């Protein structure tokens, strides 16, 4: 399947599902949710912020606004993508990231479209991420304490296909995507992250190796987040990044009996 054919298949599915989508746009409360996240890197202040957003009985904006709205968007996106890739995880509780990790409350809300029955934290993922800087969408791959060997396998695959991945990355840069590594400090400062535009496949590899992770993403401005049209914007990103997503997969999806969409043409 060519990229244009994938886009057409997604557009047909959008038309079929449009009136049944649950997502209708983010509220102003959700769009501005992380605006006042503390920039002091002080955990006590971060927990105070979270309590103000969560409420004592889950009556706060996270539970009444952000989580249900984000869940609707992620569910609608997953159902649409499932029409062309039946191997993705459809359980929303597996796709939606937790608002708190072992460090404390997160300065962003995230969800991932990933392989069914695989831990999203150690799988190549098409992700949606709402932060102070706006909505970030694209591909993420990185290391995780749960399975450090996974990163080594993915990095080996990146090394073996470095020229093809680099060529695809350059195409995506022309569409507004960025090659980024993001940490907690970037999020709280409302920074896009550590960005490079590698000049060679080896420079791309060096960046990935030194950070033990990377994103290929674009940022959707806050002004576009309050509309149902955001669904189309996110799905366009899915199509545009699909080839590089497939390039980074392990062993041609064979463990999960998935089919390549773009790399078989």
Image (tube, rainbow, N blue to C red):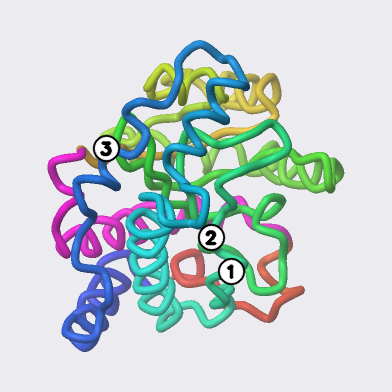
- The residue at which mark 2 appears reads as 96
Q: Which mark is residue 32?
A: 3
Specify the quadrant of the image occupied by residue 231: bottom left
Q: Nearer the viewer, residue 9 or 114?
A: 114
Residue 198 visible to the viewer: no
Q: Secondary structure at mark 3?
A: loop
Specify the quadrant of the image occupied by residue 155: top right
Q: Secondary structure at mark 2?
A: loop
Residue at point 15%, 47% (across, down): 224
Residue 93 visible to the viewer: yes
* Vertical relation: 161 (above or below) 170: below
Q: Earlier in the sequence, mark 3 or mark 2?
A: 3
Question: For the view shown, which residue lies furthest in the top direction?
Answer: 40
- Give the side of residue 84 with respect to residue 134, left or right: right
Q: CA distance from mark 1 to mark 2?
A: 6 Å
Q: Nearer the viewer, residue 144 or 45?
A: 45
Q: Earlier in the sequence, mark 1 or mark 3?
A: 3
Q: Position of residue 164 (x, y in %)?
A: 52, 43
* Vertical relation: 164 (above or below) 189: below
Magenta stretch bounds: 222-250
Residue 226 painted magenta: yes
Residue at point 28%, 79% (across, down): 9
Q: Position of residue 139 (x, y in %)?
A: 49, 47
Q: Which mark is residue 93?
A: 1
Q: Position of residue 241 (x, y in %)?
A: 40, 52
User: Given this view, does label 1 or label 3 mark the residue nearer the observer?
Assistant: 3
Q: Secondary structure at mark 1?
A: helix
Asked if labels 2 and 3 touch by Cβ distance under 8 angstroms, the answer is no
* Vertical relation: 113 (above or below) 29: below
Residue at point 43%, 72% (across, down): 78
User: Given this view, does label 3 or label 2 mark the residue nearer the observer?
Assistant: 3
Q: Which mark is residue 68?
A: none
């Amino acid at each position: 399947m060519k990229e244009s054919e994938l886009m057409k298949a997604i557009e047909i599915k959008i038309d079929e599902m449009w009136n049944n989508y649950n997502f209708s746009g983010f509220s102003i409360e959700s769009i501005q949710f992380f605006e006042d996240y503390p920039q002091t890197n002080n955990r006590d202040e971060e927990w105070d912020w979270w309590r103000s957003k969560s409420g004592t009985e889950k009556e706060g904006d996270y539970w009444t606004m952000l989580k249900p709205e984000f869940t609707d968007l992620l569910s609608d996106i997953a159902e649409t993508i499932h029409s062309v890739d039946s191997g993705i995880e459809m359980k929303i509780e597996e796709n939606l990231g937790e608002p708190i990790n072992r460090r404390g409350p997160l300065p962003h809300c995230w969800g991932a479209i990933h392989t069914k029955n695989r831990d999203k934290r150690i799988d190549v993922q098409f992700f949606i991420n709402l932060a102070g800087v706006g909505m970030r969408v694209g591909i993420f791959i990185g290391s995780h304490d749960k399975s450090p060997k996974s990163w080594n396998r993915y990095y080996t695959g990146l090394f073996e296909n470095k020229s093809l991945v680099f060529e695809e990355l350059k195409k995506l840069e022309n569409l507004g995507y960025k090659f980024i590594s993001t940490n907690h400090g970037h999020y709280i400062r409302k920074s896009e992250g550590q960005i490079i535009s590698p000049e060679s496949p080896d420079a791309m590899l060096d960046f990935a190796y030194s950070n033990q992770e990377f994103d290929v993403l674009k940022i959707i401005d806050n002004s576009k987040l309050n509309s149902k049209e955001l669904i189309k914007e996110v799905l366009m990103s899915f199509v545009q990044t699909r080839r590089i997503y497939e390039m980074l997969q392990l062993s041609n999806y064979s463990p999960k009996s998935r089919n390549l969409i773009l790399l078989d043409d």
